[in-house]
Image (cartoon, rainbow, N blue to C red):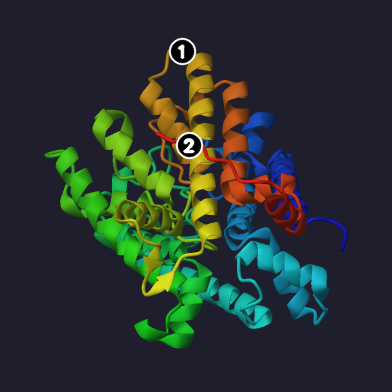
Amino acid sequence: MKKISPYIIILSGFFGLIVLGGLFLLLPISTTNGISAIDAFFLSASAVCITGLSPVVLATTFTPFGKVVIALLIQLGGLGFITVAMTFVCMLGLRMGISGTRLIDETLGSSGRLDYKEFLFRAVLITILSELVGFILNIIALHKVYGGAALVGISLFHAISSFNNAGLDLFGGSSMIPFSNNYLLLFSTALLTVVGGLGFIVINDILTKRRWKKFSVHTKIVLSVTPALLIAGGFIIFFSEWGKIDLFNAFFMSAMARTCGFTTQDLSTWNNASLSFLNVLMFIGAGPVSTGGGIKCTTFFILASTLVAFIRGKSTVVFHRRIKREAALHAMSLTIVALIYVFITGTVLCALESETSAMFLYTECFSALANVGFSAGVTPTLTTASKLMLILAMYLGRIGFLTALFLFRKRRGNSEKEDVMLVSADVIVG
């Protein structure tokens, strides 16, 4: 274990969970009339990677056992494979050791600044309490529509899916469109989505420090960018789809783009400008170490701040702190690689699905990579090859492109040695 890269453990952990989930969903006890292997593994990947794209209707395809399996996959995927594993280690009183500590460092990006045991238990506690609140609100909001065991099961499943930004539902094949006027349900869903998308580090900061001045720069960035994107996104969607959507639903859709994927609108009827902006919101995503996806709002903020600083000819300074050059390089690398991947995947999908709108296919790509779950209704019609490509996009989106790229990165000591030995070169840019 000491010789295995933590990045390999993270990648293999999520991959193993996807395979195990797919096998469980293939069991006869999980479905009412069976399910194809590609659809089972596609849905498992969607649940573990908390994406929300589904080639089948969950409410009618799966038995109560299958729905429980999906809910567990969402919960494990939202908390993160490493977080769950290390929580059990702490509960059993086992020592994590140097390799375990290093693994959490890589997962949380903490560099040893956190009390791991306290943080992990607090993350689980936050998850349970948040989902409990959502569960109660959902029961109140849905008690006129469902009753008995169905009310309890759907309310709990929806709370888990909302907090973990999964976007999978048991309402039928039209997501939350029938509930576009159920404002309590929309509020509960949006609240859980935003809280889950803040990230456990931010929530931990809020609970322990409680004052803006004491918050870390990371927390300040997330708490600044999140409401800004929500408000701006809501107004832009409202005006872009003028006359087709009310302001409350516009803000709800803006929240869902951060990265949950429940929808009260038929996206196939939206104009290209609205879908393009939705893709931007999905691509930016939520906060790091959260249940959301995307390149993360901190990455977007660092890129924007670095661009402004470059134009002004100054260093990148955020909240009276200088941003490290390595952080800016990571942000740029992540964004460039993600955009290239979306372009390649979208182009291939357009070739494979020639009769489907290119805008719809690119929305599907952004949705898969950013782990959102928005779809213009084309997921069930995709070919096996297209579904496999989206599975890979969901997987890479969940583990993070930097995690995958770091597998090929040389040790830091070697790169520093090369920097010292090699003579720098002047290259004309622009």
Could you classify mark 2 by the number of other residues whose Cα lies within 10 Å: few (under 14), some (14-19), or many (20 or more)? some
**Label 1 vs label 2, nearer the camera:** 2
Quick check: 344 left or right of 414? Answer: left
Residue at mark 1: 354
Compared with 95, 272 (above or below) is: above
For residue 352, say whether it is visible: yes
At mark 2, the secondary structure is helix
Quick check: 120 left or right of 58? Answer: right
- What x and y, as percent, mark residue 289? 55, 63
Task: Identify the residue shown where x is 31% and y is 35%.
Answer: 275
Residue at mark 2: 339
Amino acid type at mark 2: Leu
Amino acid type at mark 1: Ser
Residue closest to the eye, 384 or 114 = 114
Separation (CA) of disc 1 from disc 2? 22 Å
Could you classify mark 1 by the number of other residues whose Cα lies within 10 Å: few (under 14), some (14-19), or many (20 or more)? few
At mark 1, the secondary structure is loop
Task: Identify the residue shown where x is 62% and y is 36%.
Answer: 392
Residue 140: give its label. Answer: none
Residue closest to the eye, 64 or 212 = 212
Task: Identify the residue shown where x is 39% and y is 21%.
Answer: 358
